[in-house]
Image: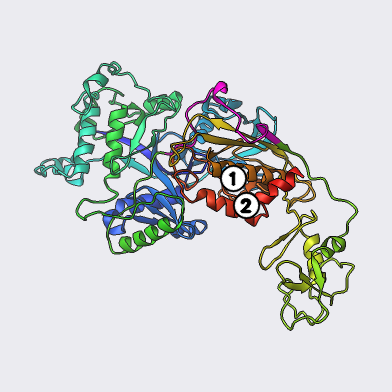
């Protein structure tokens, strides 16, 4: 009997379309729930094994990660790797962030690095797998081939990821001793999982020429004794989940790793040919995962994933999750949790295929946008306004109050009838003076408002801390970069009658200025250039014009801590949402979304940008 084994790594899809691995401990936890079957409820609470993941739950039926506080859904998958590769040895390769913390590489990258490390290569160029980096093992550094910037890398040992094997049911195990060999064989199990696993093993033992192998594929089978390599990355091999839905490409490993696995095959077993009977030497042959052809690997994946939800309990569907609003996902998630606790499997609507970018567009097809000048715009570092003190700036927006009301100043939380309780830098105004903002009418200590202005962007504007009314022209701290915008001849879902406005933001890494959180410290810029999309409709063009104003005022991006990766000192979005998915709405950042244009207009208005702003910019 031959056993096809693999290392299981659970992964989630981030907003850049890359599959990120869960840690070995989390993958073991998910596998434990998988193997527990329907009595576990079909949901995995990640906070039970990692407190940092407390808001997250995985729904195994739909293969989605659900964030309880925001309603965000992200696809997850159960991926298979060669047992001799990095995850099968507990090896994790990581790179150092700007804040000194460590981030693991994608599993495919880590496996490639580990393979070169084991071969004692002095360095490894990652260009072949789509990354412009060189890893230098002598210095344990990562070098950006374009910028020559270097980062530290490290290799550490962790838990080995869980292993799965296409084993026979216990009643069908081969006898372990002569005594047990004499006992009568139990009837074979007829459940779908065992039938599929049995058929996979039979096909492999017969040189993959059994009934699972279609005639067209049999013509391409390698000769006996040869190892058939898996398809190269990007070839489109798909893995099927428990419902037979395609989840993503099957990961492959370098051919050297496959040869290493083949060379470790026990004596008496020839890779690619039938194994000797187990009774001959008391050992069970084990075939490397790479020797399975694509069809058999898919069948094995189906068989292993059948454990997720048994077929004895009826599946109850939850309301469709289409759309970007967090309300529906949140309600569906709560419903799923309750159903899971009752022992019912939960079936969230399966997400569409992620489509981040439009079909290829030639240069001749890219057109300028009618009514919008130029096709790109740059920003530079902010020019500091000179000649006006904070007191002089605020004087334009305030009216002095001779008899303050007997209520709290919402900045220092002291009574307005008492002096300001602010204990920072000493403004040149008396701490007991009180002023009222001219438009909204809210009252504060002038001392507190001056201190608040000094702690902000100091751009000549002021925002009421209570109602957020903006006085003057608000600007941000967006680092220098470039914004491009043009028409492409494709339509967005939900907007079939118009073309698409594509916006491309490009911001390079650099050094933080005095207006940033850590002046003089470097900042990173992940995921650039970032592509965003608007319908070429009247309202879509209106949004574009206001986004151009926001770009000029440096309000689109900021430097801070990423809510996705936790990395600090990096470029992040600044409260104006963009659609970064072209042909789907899998993450909530795509189309169709009937309310998006209205929502983004409201977000821009909250930044002080409206139709009047375009006239101000022209003036």
Which quadrant of the figure has residue 505?
top right
In which quadrant is the N terminus drawn? top left
**Residue topped by disc 2:** 604
The answer, for residue 99, to whether it is visible in the render is no
**Residue topped by disc 1:** 543
Q: Nearer the viewer, residue 558 or 576?
A: 576
Q: Is residue 218 shown left or right of residue 12?
A: left
- Marks 2 and 1: CB-CB under 8 Å? yes
**Secondary structure mainly formed by the magenta segment:** loop
Which quadrant of the figure has residue 155?
top right
Q: Nearer the viewer, residue 545 or 493?
A: 545
Span shown in magenta = 354-377
Residue 359 on image: x %, y %? 47, 28
Dot 2 crowding, Cα within 10 Å, few <14, some 14–19, many 20+: many
Which quadrant of the figure has residue 338?
bottom left
**Residue 338 drawn above or below residue 562:** below
C-alpha span from label 2 to label 1: 9 Å
Q: Nearer the viewer, residue 44 or 204?
A: 44
Please tell me how many numbered marks the rendered image carries: 2
Residue beneath the point at 28% across and 43% down = 243
Residue beneath the point at 27% across and 51% down = 309
Residue beneath the point at 25% across and 28% down = 204
| First in residue order: circle 2 vs circle 1 | 1
Q: At numbered mark 1, what does the secondary structure look like: helix, strand or loop? A: helix
Residue beneath the point at 32% across and 60% down = 340
The label number, if any, that marks residue 341 in the structure image: none
Residue 55 on image: x %, y %? 48, 59
């Amino acid at each position: 009997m031959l056993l096809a084994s693999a290392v299981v790594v659970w992964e989630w899809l981030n907003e850049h379309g890359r599959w990120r691995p869960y840690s070995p401990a989390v993958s073991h936890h998910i596998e434990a729930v998988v193997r527990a079957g329907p009595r576990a409820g079909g949901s995995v609470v990640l906070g039970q094994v990692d407190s940092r993941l407390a808001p997250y739950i995985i729904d195994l039926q739909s293969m989605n990660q659900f964030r309880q506080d925001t309603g965000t859904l992200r696809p997850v998958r159960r991926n298979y790797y060669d047992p001799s590769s990095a995850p099968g040895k507990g090896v994790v390769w990581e790179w150092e962030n700007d804040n000194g913390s460590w981030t693991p590489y994608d599993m495919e990258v880590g496996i490639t690095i580990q393979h070169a490390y084991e071969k004692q290569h002095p360095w490894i160029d990652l260009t072949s797998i789509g990354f412009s980096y060189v890893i230098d093992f002598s210095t344990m550094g990562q070098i950006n081939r374009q910028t020559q910037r270097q980062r530290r890398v490290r290799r550490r040992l962790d838990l080995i990821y869980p292993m799965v094997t296409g084993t026979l049911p216990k009643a069908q195990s081969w006898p372990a001793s002569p005594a047990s060999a004499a006992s009568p064989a139990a009837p074979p199990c007829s459940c779908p999982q065992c039938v599929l696993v049995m058929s996979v093993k039979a096909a492999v033992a017969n040189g993959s020429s059994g009934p699972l192998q279609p005639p067209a594929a049999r013509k391409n089978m390698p000769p006996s004794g040869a190892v058939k390599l898996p398809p190269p990355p990007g070839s489109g091999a798909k893995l099927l989940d428990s419902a037979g839905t395609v989840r993503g490409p099957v990961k492959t490993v370098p051919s050297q790793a496959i040869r290493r696995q083949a060379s470790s095959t026990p004596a008496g077993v020839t890779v690619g040919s039938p194994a000797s009977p187990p009774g001959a030497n008391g050992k069970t042959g084990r075939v490397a995962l790479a020797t399975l052809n694509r069809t058999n690997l898919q069948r094995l994946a189906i068989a292993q994933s059948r454990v997720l939800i048994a077929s004895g309990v009826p599946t109850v569907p939850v309301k469709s999750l289409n759309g970007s609003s967090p309300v529906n996902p949140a309600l569906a998630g709560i419903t799923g949790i309750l159903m899971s606790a009752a022992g019912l499997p939960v079936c969230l609507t399966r997400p569409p295929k992620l489509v981040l970018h439009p079909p290829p567009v030639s240069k001749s097809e890219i057109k300028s946008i009618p009514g919008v000048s130029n096709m790109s715009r740059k920003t530079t570092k902010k020019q500091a306004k000179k000649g006006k003190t904070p007191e002089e700036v605020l004087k334009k927006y305030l009216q002095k109050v001779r008899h303050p009301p007997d209520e709290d100043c919402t900045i220092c939380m002291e009574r307005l009838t008492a002096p300001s309780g602010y204990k920072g830098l000493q403004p040149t105004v008396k701490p007991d003076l009180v002023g009222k903002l001219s438009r909204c009418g809210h009252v504060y200590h002038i001392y507190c408002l001056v201190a608040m202005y000094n702690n902000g962007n100091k751009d000549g504007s002021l925002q009421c801390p209570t109602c957020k009314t903006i006085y003057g022209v608000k600007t941000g701290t967006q680092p220098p970069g470039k914004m491009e915008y043009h028409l492409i001849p494709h339509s967005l879902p939900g907007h079939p009658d118009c073309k698409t406005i594509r916006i491309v933001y490009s911001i390079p890494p650099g050094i933080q200025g005095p207006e940033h959180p850590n002046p003089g410290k470097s900042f990173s810029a992940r995921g650039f250039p970032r592509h965003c999309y608007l319908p070429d409709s009247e309202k879509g063009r209106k949004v574009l014009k206001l986004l151009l104003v926001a770009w000029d005022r440096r309000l689109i991006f900021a430097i801070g801590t990423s809510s996705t990766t936790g990395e600090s000192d990096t470029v992040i979005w600044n409260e104006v949402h963009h659609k970064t998915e072209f042909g789907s709405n899998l993450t909530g950042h795509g189309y169709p979304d009937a309310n998006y244009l209205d929502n983004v207009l409201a977000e821009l208005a909250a930044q002080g940008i409206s139709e009047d702003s375009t006239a101000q910019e022209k003036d």
